[in-house]
Image: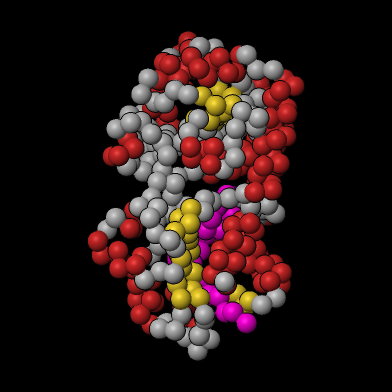
Amino acid sequence: MIKILVLVRRYRSDQSEADEHDYDYNKKVLNYLQKKFNSILVKYDLITNYKSYLKWEPNHIVFLGFDSKFLKIQTIFKKSKFSIWAKCYSSFIKNEYKHFYDNLDYIFDSCYFNNFKNKDNYHYLPTAIHKTFKNKFLKRIYLSFFKKKIIAQSKNADIIFSGSPRFNRDDNYRQKLINILIKRGIKILICAPKKLWIKSNFKIDADYEKNLSFASHNYWAIKEQYENSKFVLDLPWLDTIIPDLEKNFDPQFALGWNVFRSGFYGSNLITYDCEMNRNIGLNEENCNFYKSNIENLNYLGEELEHIIKSADVNKSQNKKNNLKNLFIQNHTYEKRWNYIIEKISN
């Protein structure tokens, strides 16, 4: 019997179907897999409770997310093997943590951009979807009040965008691109807390205000919006600034939640054509690619306008069906944890 201890750096729940740190749903998945494998015992707990497992003597400890406290734990559990599943880039580049990574048996990295490609124990493992996810009761009640309106808003818009204005970036590319699109007559529904966008000094020309609206529930996109939208726009240039990527306007650092949520609910997805996206199975049969990056937003705006205005309804429905099947079959947290357990158990 193999004893596996998963230590989590923080408690978080009720955020998103795509949240790799959802404490409750990760625990459900691991409990299910424990029954499936039969030859493993899995304990799942917060890092602060690690002392409770000293006498249990786990064969393998998996760290979920990075925390500097993990270095101490490596020295205490002398008989255990160690692995991590996290966005590893920001911790690995710091000299004080390189020894930690050298002492890992497996590295499961959700960053597409990485420093581990030459390591035999490295595995790229992006985030995924909790396929049985439901918001907690109070949030479900709150969202239910807006259900009819947000469905109507989604159907009325040409495109929905679920995301923040990216405060860590100086280029304001999202604000600028949305202004370009609404001036081209594209109706956009932003699904995000409105105050975030106002805080970013997001301003639009009064003549085009009719083409922009914010989701009435003042929240990120939910199932009904993904399912009822004409298009969902994905902009993978994130807040993490990597100089080697930025100089080429390359977004291939890590996949965001929006791609996984769009896929799980079978949206008509528009995203950037790059290896990171194709790596998870995106192609011309299940989504719409744009080729322009954010170096020239006018070119990108023209390309997005063409995709939206030239869409074929029947082809769009086929793409949505194909996308949903791809994510249900290949990109669930059950699949991800199954992969980790199989690797560390061999």
- The stretch of residues the image draws in magenta is 1-22
Q: Can residue 44 be spotted in the picture?
A: no
Farthest right residue in view: 314
Residue 289 sits in quarter:
top right
Q: Residue at x 27, y 58 (%)?
A: 94
**Relative to 316, is 9 above or below?**
below
Residue 263 sits in quarter:
top right
* Residue nearer the viewer, 150 or 84: 84
Which SS does the magenta portion mostly show?
Answer: loop
**In the displayed structure image, the side of residue 47 where residue 29 appears, left or right:** right
Q: Residue at x 28, y 39 (%)?
A: 243
Residue 246 sits in quarter:
top left
**Relative to 305, is 273 above or below?**
below
User: Residue 80: x percent and y percent?
Assistant: 46, 80
**In the displayed structure image, the side of residue 23 where residue 50 appears, left or right:** left
Q: Can residue 248 be spotted in the picture?
A: yes
- Image quadrant where one finds the C terminus: bottom right
Q: Residue at x 47, y 17 (%)?
A: 301
User: Residue 131: x percent and y percent?
Assistant: 68, 52
